[in-house]
Image (spheres, grey):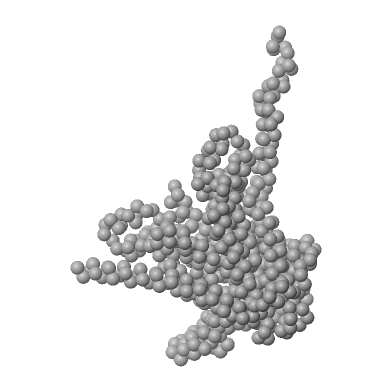
């Protein structure tokens, strides 16, 4: 009898322990978001998000971080586009031409491993590539390095979504006499909302990544104007403003971080929304 | 009409049967074009890791050939201007901060992963999954900023003095060597929060692929839920959980910006939890601006990137192979 009770107590203890850990983690997440919001809202103003830095911005004078916001959007947009050009054919090849084979599994493994490579390594590689091609720190170089970072994220997310497509789709399509390419079109139509989710997730990750663009995109106080000129990015704006000794400028770093967090969270929510709500042509 | 003699009359028809009509031929051509172009993309992806590794080896070759490897790995002085490139403080700093993070993150994360896999309904899991994705998606600079705002003061004013008064008197490992708060513990704590969702996600995925019959059998035999969980983790989940931890380790090892903001950036061998240190990624990121002026400097930084890549690749390949084996055994 006593032993049974002990077992029950143990069971309950560990259940509550696990719940405790989970709740603590959730509370920490809340704390991060609230903390950033609390410190950021005070310094956030219309001027911050609608102007480029003016002279003496890093000494506490006027201006904003519009250059970094636009720069980050350009970088992430370019990188996601470049990455989709490679990732979408790769995933479709895995599911249409090489389904269930060893090749598909090996590509999947490669993508998982690429996902694990730190973005600073991609940055260093991008930097070498840049020197090799004779480029200087520029939007283009930043896009290339960032594309490498988001490529595995985009490809693996899309891959997961394509593998959830119903099996009979393939059999039905091929039995009607379609070529593989025509079946690919059917599959793409079926998974289009998921593809959007994957692209948005990659986009959000691209906006937040700093280590890869540190060497390759450089930094500038001007608005981005050419593919071959340096470009500012939001994470680096936070970082540089924070490293100044002036409290007013540091407050701006909190505001920039808030803008960055809101952007990333909004994209994340949008990604979730596109997965669950879109899909007029999806067979369920 | 002699059919055998006038075969040329039938040639177009024979050809049409073999190739199909013009429309069908066009469809096939399009199909093989698509196959080849998407195959090229697959080839690019497969070669990419190799190309990155090869590039880093080539770029770091000058320093690898100028100094013996053991001198680079164990040398403790970092003075590029005087031609001294000792990576030991950075390697030690990276390992130390990662270990601190893992010490703080592993147990809560594994338990949370187990809870998600074994105790929650699929609907609750569907609600929690996006939350974990959200946590992963928060940029590392935001984590770093949060660390500066909240963790640094906490370590500086509360944890540091307390630890120094109690444990620090006996163990030098807990002595407060550095009053600023920037150091291994602060960086490690924030890093722990950053790798937490990754470990949770992988643990959950691996445990969920354990056979369901096992669960049902154990419960039917009268085991409590915790006993069932214990047994499943021990019999089926352990390699996967280890893989999750290794993945978390390699993610933490390569994290750049958040650590750079919190670790203090002092190239020394850390001896205490509160010591400032320096990590390999921070070394690369902090010095990119100066690399043009000093000989071998760029090569040394590329060498640091190569070391980082080697460690991360090794850990990732091992962990992924384990995970693939586990989840595929279940799928079959």
Task: Determine if residue A121 is in view.
Answer: no
Does A133 sit left or right of B207 as displayed? right
Does A194 sit left or right of B211 as displayed? right
At 61% across and 59% down in the image, what residue appears? Answer: A200
Please determine whether, in this image, residue A85 is positioned above or below residue B149: above
Percent x, y of residue B277: 59, 80
Q: Give the farthest residue toward the front.
A: A46
At 56% across and 89% down in the image, what residue appears? Answer: B179
**The quadrant where residue A130 appears:** bottom right
Percent x, y of residue A89: 64, 49
Percent x, y of residue B165: 46, 91
**The quadrant where residue A202 appears:** bottom right
Percent x, y of residue B258: 60, 75
Q: Nearer the viewer, residue B79 or A110?
A: A110
Does A73 sit left or right of A106 as displayed? right
Q: In which quadrant will I find the N terminus of chain B?
A: top right
Q: Nearer the viewer, residue B201 or B278?
A: B201
Q: Nearer the viewer, residue A40 or B137?
A: A40
At 69% across and 41% down in the image, what residue appears? Answer: B33
């Amino acid at each position: 009898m006593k032993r049974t009770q002990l077992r029950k107590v143990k069971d309950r203890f560990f259940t509550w322990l696990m719940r405790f850990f989970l709740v603590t983690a959730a509370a920490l997440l809340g704390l991060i978001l609230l903390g950033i919001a609390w410190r950021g809202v005070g310094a956030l103003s219309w001027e911050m998000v609608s102007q480029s830095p003016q002279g003496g911005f890093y000494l506490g004078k006027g201006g904003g971080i519009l250059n970094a916001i636009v720069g980050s959007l350009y970088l992430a947009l370019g990188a996601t586009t470049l990455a989709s050009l490679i990732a979408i054919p790769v995933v479709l090849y895995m599911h249409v031409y090489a389904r269930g084979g060893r090749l598909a599994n090996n590509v999947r493994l490669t993508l998982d491993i690429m996902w694990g490579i730190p973005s600073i390594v991609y940055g260093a590689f991008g930097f070498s590539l840049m020197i090799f091609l004779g480029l200087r720190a520029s939007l283009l170089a930043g896009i290339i390095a960032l594309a490498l970072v988001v490529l595995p994220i985009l490809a693996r997310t899309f891959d997961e979504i394509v593998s959830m497509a119903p099996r009979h789709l393939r059999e039905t399509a091929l039995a009607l006499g379609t070529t593989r390419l025509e079946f690919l079109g059917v599959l793409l139509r079926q998974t289009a909302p998921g593809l959007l989710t994957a692209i948005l997730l990659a986009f959000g990750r691209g906006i937040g990544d700093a280590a890869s663009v540190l060497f390759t995109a450089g930094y500038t106080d001007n608005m981005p104007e050419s593919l071959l000129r340096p470009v500012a990015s939001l994470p680096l704006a936070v970082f540089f403003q924070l490293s100044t000794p002036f409290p007013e400028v540091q407050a701006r770093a909190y505001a920039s971080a808030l803008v960055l967090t809101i952007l990333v969270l909004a994209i994340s929510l949008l990604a979730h929304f596109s997965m669950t709500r879109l899909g007029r042509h999806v067979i369920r | 009409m002699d059919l055998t003699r006038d075969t040329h009359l039938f040639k177009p028809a024979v050809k049409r049967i073999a190739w199909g009509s013009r429309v069908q031929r066009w469809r096939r051509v399009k199909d093989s074009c698509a196959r080849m172009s998407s195959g090229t993309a697959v080839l690019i992806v497969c070669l990419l890791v190799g190309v990155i590794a090869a590039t880093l080896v080539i770029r770091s070759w000058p320093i690898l050939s100028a100094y013996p490897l053991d001198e680079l790995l164990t040398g403790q002085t970092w003075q590029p201007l005087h031609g001294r490139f000792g990576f030991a403080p950075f390697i030690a700093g990276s390992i130390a901060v990662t270990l601190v993070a893992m010490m703080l993150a592993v147990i809560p994360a594994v338990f949370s992963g187990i809870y998600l896999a074994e105790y929650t309904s699929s609907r609750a899991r569907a609600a929690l999954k996006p939350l974990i994705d959200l946590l992963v998606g928060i940029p590392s600079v935001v984590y770093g900023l949060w660390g500066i705002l909240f963790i640094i003061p906490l370590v500086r004013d509360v944890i540091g003095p307390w630890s120094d008064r109690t444990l620090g008197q006996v163990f030098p490992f807990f002595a407060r060597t550095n009053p600023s708060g920037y150091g291994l513990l602060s960086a490690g704590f924030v890093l722990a929060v950053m790798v937490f969702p990754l470990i949770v996600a992988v643990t959950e995925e691996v445990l969920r692929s354990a056979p369901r019959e096992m669960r049902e059998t154990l419960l039917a035999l009268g085991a409590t839920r915790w006993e069932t969980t214990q047994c499943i983790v021990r019999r089926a989940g352990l390699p996967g959980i280890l893989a999750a931890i290794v993945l978390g380790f390699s993610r933490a090892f390569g994290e750049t910006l958040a650590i750079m903001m919190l670790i203090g950036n002092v190239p020394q061998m850390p001896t205490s939890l509160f010591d400032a240190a320096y990590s390999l990624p921070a070394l690369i990121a902090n010095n990119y601006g100066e690399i043009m002026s000093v000989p071998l400097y760029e090569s040394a930084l590329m060498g640091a990137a190569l070391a980082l890549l080697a460690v991360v690749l090794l850990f990732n390949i091992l962990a992924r192979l384990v995970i693939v084996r586990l989840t595929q055994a279940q799928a079959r």
